[in-house]
Image: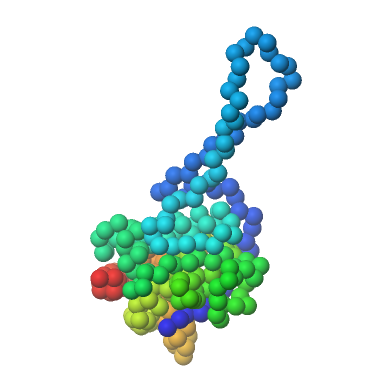
Amino acid sequence: MQNIINEIPSTSPDATPTATVSADGTTVTITIPVPTGTPTQTPTICPPTPTNTPTPTPISTPEISEYNVEFTENWPSAQKSAAVSAIIAVGEKLASISGGSAAQAFRNAYQGKQGLPTMFLWGAGGYTGGYNIGECQGDDVGGCTVGQSGSVYLIVFFSFLSTDSQWRMNNVVHELGHLFNDLHGGYPMSFAGNYAAQRKELLRPQEGTTVWQMHAIYDPNTPSITNPEMFADMYVAWTYDAWNRDPLNEDLVKNATTQMDAKMSEWVH
Ligand SMILES: [Zn+2]
């Protein structure tokens, strides 16, 4: 089964990314190039300076190839940094129930029996990287999960609709929720459907610029849309342990999280 879901913009338009050079739990090394211009005065008594010019080290992206994920080359660095952080967060959460490393847990959940990579395609400006993006064709905002496309599992992002880093990570985790549902037979969305009518009580409302529900649709007449969106947003809440905080909803949240932990454990084992 494939979910072709376009995330609706709910906050401000994308803006020029700020120069974020680190992601959660990762180290980014920057070497500042040393100026090599010719001095205006030539000293005659100083020892000669070395002639080899240091080579600037490019800003490195965190090494996540162990997760069996790939990115098209045109990802803007700040956006890619958010995506990488989200992937690591999902891996760590999965590892908390399956054991092993975050990368192992992520691969176990996402690469399927064929060991296919998850490809993150930056589709701004109509770029497809040669992939068939199916019904995501024609979208131009937010993210869209294609599912299997050739020899990859494909998720397309056309833009991030906010500069809020948590918002961006939530968008990525949400799409990973759709893909998880696809890869686990649609059982996750059936489970989430049990809670869809209580979406507002169970999930977290927007806080400041951070949106926790990426596609807050509820229509009991269209469970084929309502249920996968509910699971994808529950996946965000589960990953970041970011559920509704209202004390009135405490019992509901406790019940849902207990059930979801049990189901997730079942699905990844
Ligand atoms: Zn969605």
Give the residue displayed 74% in from the left and 20% down from the top: 40
- Check the image and report above or below for 58 versus 51: below
Q: Quadrant of the N terminus?
A: bottom left
* Lateral position of residue 62 relative to residue 190, left or right: right
Q: Farthest top residue?
A: 45
- Please state which of residues 249 and 148 is positioned toward the viewer in this rendering: 148
Give the residue displayed 68% in from the left and 13% down from the top: 43
- Check the image and report above or below for 109 versus 163: below
Q: Farthest bottom residue?
A: 221
- Please state which of residues 182 and 209 is positioned toward the viewer in this rendering: 182
Give the residue displayed 66% in from the left and 67% down from the top: 125
For the image shown, how many numbered marks are present on the structure? 0
Quadrant of res 33: top right
Q: Quick check: can you spot residue 167?
A: no
Q: Quick check: can you spot residue 126?
A: yes
* Lateral position of residue 249 relative to residue 10, left or right: left
Give the residue displayed 60% in from the left and 78% down from the top: 137
- Check the image and report above or below for 3 versus 241: below
Point out residue 123 in the picture as x, y percentages from the top left corner: 59, 68
- Please state which of residues 57 and 49 is positioned toward the viewer in this rendering: 49
Point out residue 38 in the picture as x, y percentages from the top left corner: 71, 25
Q: Quadrant of the C terminus?
A: bottom left
- Please state which of residues 150 and 100 is positioned toward the viewer in this rendering: 150
Point out residue 15 in the picture as x, y percentages from the top left corner: 64, 58
Q: Farthest right residue?
A: 40
Point out residue 226 in the picture as x, y percentages from the top left corner: 45, 82
